[in-house]
Amino acid sequence: MELRKAIETRTSVRQFTSEPVAKSDLQEMVRLASLAPSVNNYQPWSFVVVTNKELLRRMADAVREKIHALPENSSRMSRVVKKQVEFFATFFENAPALVVIATQEYETILEKGVTLTHAEINEMRNSPDIQSVGGCAQNLLLAAMDMGYGACWMSAPLIAKKELEAILALDSTLNLMSFIAVGKPLRQQLPREKRPVEELIRFVE
Ligand SMILES: Cc1cc2nc3c(=O)[nH]c(=O)nc-3n(C[C@H](O)[C@H](O)[C@H](O)COP(=O)(O)O)c2cc1C
């Protein structure tokens, strides 16, 4: 698929057919994702690809439990809101595949030569590890699309970050960052409406 068309027609897919995603396709998506730019080319990412239904259910249960435990405010909408959030945070359990992206600590050149801590430099640079994962995740979405799949980037499940890290037996040096649910779209979807570029841009000439 032509890149511009992929960018223009991409949309988040949250409902999938039961068709499995070939392991080779998942590996290729991750390979393409990992070609993204990253801070100092540190490539501070690591991927766990989950297709095991039982594990996906356990992960979704951990997320559900956290959402249920959130204190409700007095609004009559509270229950409805929680139910909605529950869907947006747990639908990955019905996806044929889930790509989990985690990051590891990166080194900056600066920290080798000044007394600032890694955390201070990270703040100064506005979390370049998180920024790097953004490019990586977007590559993965576009790669999935190019290969005939649909996908959705997810951060809501991270409400159960610690529990998910344990279920996934994530190495303690890794920091769970994003989920990408992948599969064949259940139905064709039109892309969401976006703000016109004229509203977003300011040229300084
Ligand atoms: C960082 C990030 C986190 C997101 N987290 C979730 C999520 O947890 N659950 C979900 O259903 N969608 C999630 N999304 C998808 C957005 O809701 C979606 O991109 C947005 O509504 C625009 O729709 P589009 O992707 O179809 O253009 C996330 C997207 C991004 C970029």
Image (cartoon, grey):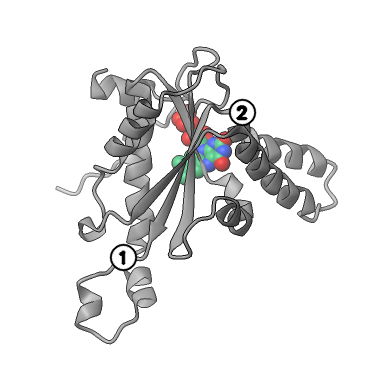
Q: Where is residue 13 in the image (x, y as percent from the top left)?
A: 51, 25
The answer to which quarter of the image holds residue 197 is: top left
Identify which residue is drawn at 38% across, 61% down: 104
Left-right relation of 52 to 138:
right
Instruction: Name, please, the residue furthest toward the left.
Output: 205
**Mark 1 lies on residue:** 106
Q: Which mark is drawn over residue 94? A: 2
Q: Residues within 10 Å of mark 2 (few under 14, many from 20)?
A: many
Circle 2 — which element?
A: helix
Left-right relation of 98 to 70:
left
Label 2 is placed on what type of residue?
Asn
Q: Position of residue 138 (x, y in %)?
A: 36, 38
Q: Where is residue 43 in the image (x, y as percent from the top left)?
A: 27, 54
Q: Residues within 10 Å of mark 1 (few under 14, many from 20)?
A: some
Q: Where is residue 94 in the image (x, y as percent from the top left)?
A: 61, 28
Q: Which of the pair 100/80 is nearer the observer? A: 100
- Vertical arrangement, residue 38 with respect to residue 116, above or below: above
Identify which residue is drawn at 38% across, 41% down: 137
Label 1 is placed on what type of residue?
Tyr
Identify which residue is drawn at 75% across, 49% down: 65
Left-right relation of 82 to 162:
right
Identify which residue is drawn at 52% across, 17% down: 19
Q: Which of the pair 43/156 is nearer the observer? A: 43
- Vertical arrangement, residue 1 with respect to residue 89, above or below: above
Say whether disc 1 or disc 2 marks the residue closer to the N-terminus: 2
Q: Quadrant of the N terminus?
A: top left
Instruction: Name, please, the residue furthest toward the bottom.
Output: 115
The answer to which quarter of the image holds residue 54 is: top right
Real-space Cα separation, disc 1 to disc 2, in angstroms:
33 Å
